[in-house]
Amino acid sequence: MPVTIANFLTILRLLISPFFLLIYIYPKYFYVTPFTLPFVLLFLFLVMELSDLFDGYVARKYDQVTDLGKLLDPMADSITRTSAFLTFTQAPVHLPILFVFIFLYRDSVVSTLRTICALRGYALAARSSGKIKAVIQAVAIFVILAAMIPHSLGGISDFTLNALATVVAGVAALYSMYSGVEYIVVNRQYLVQMLGKD
């Protein structure tokens, strides 16, 4: 099966994720200065978010919706955003790693349930709360990266950067938990039927 443009954009998002982490942790190996680091990370993040925006648009407009794309897209969303939050657990942001576990646990549970039901012939519908969750996470990442700019100039302290990051990531984590619970509650009838099959 040839790789469609939509799937290429999704794969591009997956390939950028490790560079986001590596550049954050080892900026000097990529010739990135402390001042330019937030801007480089913002650029990478915007590329990932734009690829997320356009892969779905391209798939629908040019009839490139594939089974591979249906699997890759939510996986790429989870990996890229969770990778960003995992990156922020390191200095200078020092985000509590608890939030990363919440993001991972929520996405793992939902994707596993969807996969099990799909294998048994039933597709669980996506919820609007899942889309809102993705937007809130993206906004949180953007706010943290934006706050790194004045921090790199000495305009805000490590404590202020950490406090701000903790608040915005905490909001994202709380809504992620809510969206996960809502997904299970709304689909509980189908989940019981599907999981109860031999």
Image (cartoon, grey):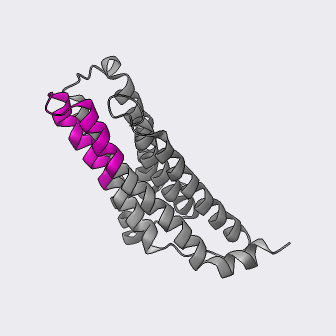
Quarter of the image for residue 57 reads bottom left
Residue 5 to residue 19: above or below? below
Residue 162 to residue 103: above or below? above
Q: Is residue 156 left or right of residue 134?
A: left
Residue with the most extreme right position: 198
Residue 46 makes an appearance in the image: no
**What residue lies at 54% left-to-right and 46% top-to-bottom?**
101
Depth check: 181 or 19 in front? 181
- Residue 147 in percent (x, y) is at 22, 41
- Name the quarter where the C terminus is drawn: bottom right
Depth check: 192 or 32 in front? 192
- Residue 196 in percent (x, y) is at 80, 74
Residue 38 to residue 104: above or below? above
Q: Report the predominant secondary structure element of the magenta stretch.
A: helix
Quarter of the image for residue 56 reads bottom left
- Residue 16 lies in the magenta stretch: no
Q: Is residue 9 left or right of residue 68?
A: left
Q: Is residue 41 left or right of residue 127?
A: left
Residue 74 to residue 100: above or below? below
- Residue 34 in percent (x, y) is at 23, 24
Q: Which residues are magenta?
A: 139-167
Residue 8 makes an appearance in the image: yes
**What residue lies at 24% left-to-right and 34% top-to-bottom?**
38
- Residue 143 lies in the magenta stretch: yes
